[in-house]
Image (cartoon, rainbow, N blue to C red):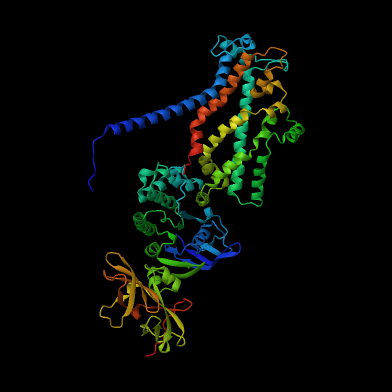
Amino acid sequence: MATLSLSGIRKSFGQTEVLHGIELDVADGEMIVVVGASGCGKSTLLRIVAGLETPTSGTVRIDGRDVTKLEPADRDIAMVFQNYALYPHMSVFENMAYGLRIRGLPMVEIRKRVAEAAEMLEIGPLLERKPRQLSGGQRQRVAMGRAIVREPKLFLFDEPLSNLDAKLRVQMRAEIRRLQKRLGVTSLFVTHDQVEAMTLGDRLVVMHKGRAAQVASPMEVWGVPADTYVAGFIGSPAMNFLSATLVQGGGGAQLKAGPALPFADGPRPGEDGTKLVIGIRPEHVQHLPDGAGALPLAVDLVEPLGSETVIHGRLPGEEVLVARLPLAAGAIGEVLPVGLPPASWHVFSAEGARLPARATAPA
Amino acid sequence: MRMLMRDTTMEDIALARATARRQARSRWIAHALLALGVLIFAFPIWITVVGSTHDVSTIGRGEVPLWFGGEGVANYVSAWLRGGSSLRTTGAVPAWLMLWNSLNMAVLIAVGKIAISLLSAYAVVFFAFPGRMVCFWLIFITLMLPVEVRIIPTFEVMVNLGLINSMAGLVVPLVASATATLLFRQFFLTIPDEYVEAAKIDGAGPLRFFKDVVLPLSVTNIAALFVILFIYGWNQYLWPLLIVSDKDLETVVVGMTKMIGTGDQQNEWNIIMATAVLAMLPPVLVVILMQRWFVKGLTETEK
């Protein structure tokens, strides 16, 4: 069990810099999920922690010790790979024992550790099988087992669930979480799947173009996204972004789609007329059948999900809006009266950064 | 919708019969063609096998017997222990010695080629070192220079090294193999990077990874290549002819042709044919014994 600390991690491949200075401190036993679209540098970051890549600059510390220059084997880490990387010619037992054998552990100890891990993962009966005789979920467990028997300071997961079918993924997700909590091993988990990220992580690192756009707990990332990228990345369907301008001396916004509404949480700094982006999650869009203060949404696609309906449409001014409404309403071509309650707004600058309310709100 | 049914008519039965006839005919034609092919390939071997069981004068008279004679045992015993002779050679070399030499040469060539090409392919694929691609292309280019093309300089080098008339001189120039290196390189490229990375995290060094992961994964490829290279080595003619004049190192393929004289003396065709049959056996055995692996190596991948 250990802490992990990254400071100023930069990485360039030739001329292209893929990581622009990552700072991260992971507490003992914490599960950090690094999430981002493909090409954001999240896998590179993980590989730098693993020691499979060397950073161009910056330091990696595990338990306070600078391991930047160390070989992967000397870092006391374990990694679960996307395609599991089980040696195909070795049995499950041999796969799990291989790292321990190289470290020269006595056979008795190896057997004990493998047996324990196998029991924990319920793969005891499979120990003599070859990886190709296993299902995807079983291979996943073996890959986890290989990591567990090492009793490492750090678990690294490189999109380990992306090769499983949807149902198994949900099951394994819960299992990984339970296991990580039980073993209390500090973990870094890389994924592109926002649901995985939200459900697994104690904290999330949302990566965007080689930078950590936000490092926060899942609910904070969802509730107070740091910029429009994070806001749009987390949540499904993605958050709506409406263009607006600042009015009422910073106290409200004039939507391009229609009315000027006051902010619910206080005024924003800036001159009237400054361009803004107002974000609102589809689940916060309201259906206002009585029509008071409603905006007309011209429906052009309806996706029923059973308990709710996702409605895609356009507001006046050709603003696209997606609403997730708890009813089986709306038909293509219909005009639906919807409300955009300011209490659910996320206010961003035109550049995309979050604009928090001024601390001293005028009475 | 209701399915339309009608009774089976005579026409239907005739149609079915015609189909069966056509299928039987095409099957028959295919088998006939196969049999013809076998005949064409097997006939010379048959002549040789049958010829090796007659006495020396039968074939000497110009007869080509199609059935076994009574001298089989005697011919094989004398081929094995004494060997055939002709004017060109000063004495006969027994078949057992020639076979032993050929076996040594073929095994050494095959094993040497596999060992060297495995290691060079491993270096080219898994290590990033300066001039890696240059090395690869240098190896690749030697494909254009088979033994026959570089035979004079090679001979010169062997003379200077004092390796004339030695097993080393016989084997060493044939051991480097661009083809096998290329084959292993292609195979190694299919080994996922994840294995390399997993091994790094497990703490396996390069040689350990080679021994524990790469070699076991390459077993079927190695077996397939061994068959091909063994036969390649066994069939070497020009190089052994050039480098070896010592009778104790005579290989069977060369020795056999040396048994055939220039016509001043009657050739011992029965002995020559017996030797030819003996020379055929080891490659056949290798193919039969390793066939299972061979086919597996060519068709299957363990991934």
Q: Is residue B46 above or below residue B172?
A: above
For the question of whether residue B45 can be seen, the reply is yes
Q: Residue B169, relative to residue A91: is it above or below?
A: above
Q: Which residue lies furthest to the bottom in this view?
A: A363
Quadrant housing the N terminus of chain A: bottom left
Identify whether B22 is placed above or below A258: above
Residue B208 visible in rendering: no
| Quarter of image, res B121 | top right
Say left or right for B118 vs A323: right
Compared across the picture, whether B300 is left or right of A293 comes to right
Looking at the picture, how far across and down is residue A109, in whole percent? 43, 46
- Quarter of the figure with residue B75: top right
**Residue nearest the viewer, comparing B272 with A95:** B272
Residue A264 in percent (x, y) is at 35, 83
Figure label count? 0
Left or right of A61, for residue A309: left
Pick the quarter of the image with the C terminus of chain A.
Answer: bottom left
Looking at the image, residue A280 sits to the left or right of residue A37; the answer is: left
Indicate the position of residue A7 as horizontal and vertical percent values. Answer: 53, 67
Residue B127 lies, with reference to residue A29, above or below; the image says: above
Residue at 47% over, 79% down = A350
Residue A250 spot, x, y in % from top left: 42, 87
Residue furthest to the left in view is B2
The front one of A126 and B251 is: B251
Near-viewer residue (A120 or A210): A210
In this view of the protein, which residue sits in the foreground, B203 or A225?
A: A225
